[in-house]
Image (spheres, helix red, strand yellow):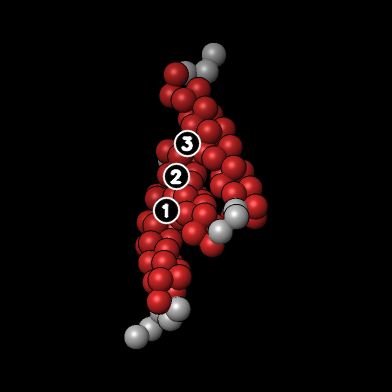
Amino acid sequence: MATLLELAIVYALVCVVAAMLLCTARLLIGPSAHDRVLALDTLWMCGMLLALVLGIRFGSQLYFEAAMLIALVGFVSTVAIAKFLMRGEVIE
């Protein structure tokens, strides 16, 4: 019999993967560049959450470190893309 924690982890994995699929659809179909940036921003957050849930599931510290790297790189890339869309250049 599965414990409540195992069922919650499976449910969280299914929800995160569904969110990633919907974000990928918005990234590919999005009518404007701003919609695509928001979809990409949400996609890296979902990737970070996926790594965190897998880290809880397998009990490995490696997944938590990967989630931290995804968060740092995702934040910097979102800021760079937003700055590019606003000004047309990244480096002033």
**Disc 1 and disc 2 in contact, CB within 8 angstroms:** yes
Label 2 or label 3, whichever comes before in sequence order: 2
Using the image as rendered, state which of residue 33 and residue 76 is in the foreground. Answer: 33
In the rendered image, the vertical position of residue 79 relative to residue 55, given as above or below? below
Q: Secondary structure at mark 1?
A: helix
Question: Is residue 80 in view?
Answer: no
* Residue closest to the eye, 63 or 48: 48
* Amino acid type, callout 1: Ala
The residue pinned by badge 1 equals: 67
Q: Which residue is mark 2?
A: 49
Q: How many angstroms separate mark 1 from mark 2 (CA)? A: 7 Å
Q: Quarter of the image containing the N terminus?
A: top right
Q: Toward the viewer: 67 or 78? A: 78
Circle 3: residue type = Arg
Q: Position of residue 46 (x, y in %)?
A: 48, 46
Residue tagged by mark 3? 57
Query: How far, Cα to Cα, is label 3 from label 1?
Result: 14 Å
